Every structure is written in C-alpha cells, then in structure tokens.
Image: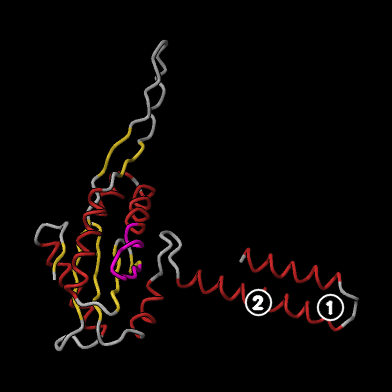
Amino acid sequence: MEKGFFWSLLVVVLAVSALPGSASATVYLMAAGLILGLSVVETGYSMAYRDELTGLPSRRAFPDTLAALGSRYAIAMVDIDHFKQFNDKHGHDVGDQVLRMVAGKLGRVAGGGRAFRYGGEEFAVIFAGRSRDEAMPHLEELRSAIGNAKFTVRGHPRARSRLKGAKRKSTRRKKLAVTVSIGVAERNGRYTTPERVLKAADKALYRAKRAGRNQVRT
C-alpha cells in the first residue's frame, strides 16, 4: 500500500507540473488513480489471504493452490506438539511467539514446499510436482530444525520486595522445547483428489501423535 501511495503521489506531482487542463495532466491523474486503486486491491487481497500473525498464506488461499495442482504432488500436515500447554502455562503472547517461530521455519522449508497456516497450531505444506518420498527428507529436516531451535521465554520480573535493603530479583529466562508432528501423503491411485490426499495426510499426522509425537509419518 505504501509503495502504491508513493507512486500515485509521484504521478500527481507530474500532473501538477504539467500544464493545467492539458492532455498530459489528465493522463497523469488517471494513472495516479489507477495505481492507487490497484494498490488498494492488492492490499485487500493480502489481508484476506495472508495470516496476520505468522505472515504465511492463510487457509483461504489453500483451495486455490489445491485447484492448481497437477497430477503429482504431496501434502503434509504439521501440528505443534502440546501447544495448549504453552498458552496455559506461559500465556497467549508466548503461544504467539511459538507460532511465529514455527511459521518462520515452515516458510523456509526446502524441496519446493509451500507452507500455509491451516488453523490454530496446525499448518499445511504442499509439495507440487513432488512425491511423498521426495518430500520426506525435507520434512525431516524441518522437524529437526524446529526441535533444535533455541526458544527462550523471558519471565516476568518478580515484584520488588518492600523490605528495606532487599535486592531486586533479575528477570528470569526459561528455555522451552518446541516440537512438531507431521503427516504426509501423496496423490496416487488410491488418493486421486487433493481432498483425499489431505485427509490421508491428516490421518498420518494423528499416527505420528499416537506414536509419541516429534516425528514424520506417512
């Protein structure tokens, strides 16, 4: 939006510098309006299809991507393990930090994967043109990167003691272990539509959770 405003303002300056009422001034003003209008549309699209907290494409953008897939692809479902505990024990601000950290790793997933925030603590990754076996190493790398990330929470400073001469306690830091469970499936003779592949990936995700979490299952 800022860039669109800048360019439209620049064009308006050109229009003002041209002869008032001239054809050039009219063209410049029309161009400024067009640029600003396109900028508003682009901003509206970004707000609707991009998750505000994580910066990843949101679930609303997911169906369009599924519809554009060819005949060869894999879909992974990713869920943050024990996410509710982060919110319950440390507050929603820490929960949001965890979501952003995981989303940052997901946004850099290798192998051509495209990550989406699917809802809550759940994410999806689409590997267009890749098989399940081709996606697996990249998902294992992703799982390992998240599990090995150093996530430190700054604790609230303790209230200053009212006793005379008491020293103020320093702010405490606590390291949290963040892990994810991942389920992945591919399009094949059994799962012939994106919806069926997605459902198979979701079932694989629950197998990963039942098996102890912090792993990738097919």
Q: Is residue 33 above or below residue 147?
A: below
> In which quarter of the view is residue 198 placed?
bottom left
In magenta stretch: residue 91: no
> In which quarter of the view is residue 201 placed?
bottom left
The mark tally for this picture is 2
Crowding at dot 2, Cα within 10 Å, few <14 / some 14-19 / many 20+, comes out as some
Query: Which amino acid type corresponds to the residue marked 2 in the rendered image?
Result: Gly
In the rendered view, does 15 fall on the left or right side of 84? right
Query: Magenta residues, as a range?
Result: 105-116
* Viewer-closest of 24 and 152: 24
Q: Earlier in the sequence, mark 2 or mark 1?
A: 1
Name of the residue lying farthest toward the top = 165
Q: Residue at x 40, y 26 (%)?
A: 159
Q: Which mark is residue 25?
A: 1
> Residue 102 at x, y = what percent?
32, 56
Name of the residue lying farthest toward the left = 211
- Element marked by disc 2: helix
* Viewer-closest of 83 and 109: 109
- Element marked by disc 1: helix
Q: Residue at x 27, y 39 (%)?
A: 175
Query: Which amino acid type corresponds to the residue marked 1 in the rendered image?
Result: Ala
In magenta stretch: residue 107: yes
The quarter in which the N terminus is drawn is bottom right
> Residue 204 at x, y = what percent?
15, 71
Q: Is residue 64 above or below residue 102?
A: below
The quarter in which the C terminus is drawn is bottom left
> Residue 117 at x, y = what percent?
35, 66
Q: Is residue 66 above or below residue 151?
A: below
The residue carrying mark 2 is: 37
